[in-house]
Image: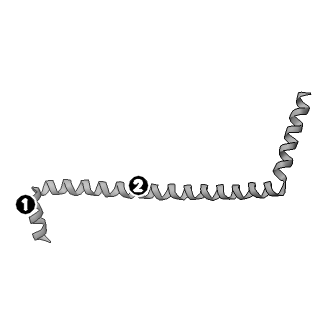
């Protein structure tokens, strides 16, 4: 391990330079971890929304085929005409 560090020192400069590089790498790794956590959180929210949309679609289709939406639309139209009279 010491040989490797000495070789890195020769290639990159003194120990101070290595410590600075190490600090930057740690910050980059920390930022990547933060981004991964945020990405997973957003993926979860997105999946929840997709599930909710699928449920809404099923509900609307069921109401449409059972005639519930048609009846509601006619009722709303009738109330609108009554309000204008």
Q: Position of residue 42 (x, y in %)?
A: 51, 54
Q: Quadrant of residue 37?
A: bottom left
- Judging by the rendered image, the residue that carries numbered circle 2 is 35
Front residue (pair 16, 47): 47
Where 9 falls versus 84 (above or below)? below
- Judging by the rendered image, the residue that carries numbered circle 1 is 10
Q: Position of residue 5 (x, y in %)?
A: 13, 66
Instruction: Determine whether the residue tagged by mark 1 lies in a helix, strand or loop.
Output: helix
Q: Residue furthest top?
A: 85
Front residue (pair 49, 76): 76
Q: Position of residue 69 (x, y in %)?
A: 81, 50
- The quadrant of the rendering that contains the C terminus is top right
Residue count near mark 1 (Cα–Cα under 10 Å), binned few <14, some 14–19, many ≥20: few
Q: Position of residue 24 (x, y in %)?
A: 25, 53
Residue count near mark 2 (Cα–Cα under 10 Å), binned few <14, some 14–19, many ≥20: few
Instruction: Determine whether the residue tagged by mark 2 lies in a helix, strand or loop.
Output: helix
Q: Residue furthest left?
A: 10
At horizontal 74% and vertical 54% (from top left) the residue drawn is 60
- First in sequence, mark 1 or 2: give its number: 1
Disc 1 from disc 2: Cα separation: 34 Å
Horizontally, residue 25 falls left or right of residue 3, namely: right
At horizontal 15% and vertical 72% (from top left) the residue drawn is 1
Q: Quadrant of residue 48?
A: bottom right
């Amino acid at each position: 391990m010491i040989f490797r560090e000495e070789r890195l020192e020769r290639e990159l400069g003194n120990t101070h330079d290595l410590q600075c590089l190490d600090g930057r790498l740690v910050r980059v790794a920390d930022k990547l971890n933060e981004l991964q956590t945020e990405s997973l959180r957003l993926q979860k929210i997105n999946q929840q929304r997709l599930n909710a949309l699928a449920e809404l679609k099923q509900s609307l289709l069921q109401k449409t085929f059972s005639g519930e939406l048609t009846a509601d639309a006619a009722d709303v139209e009738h109330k609108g005409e009554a309000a204008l009279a």
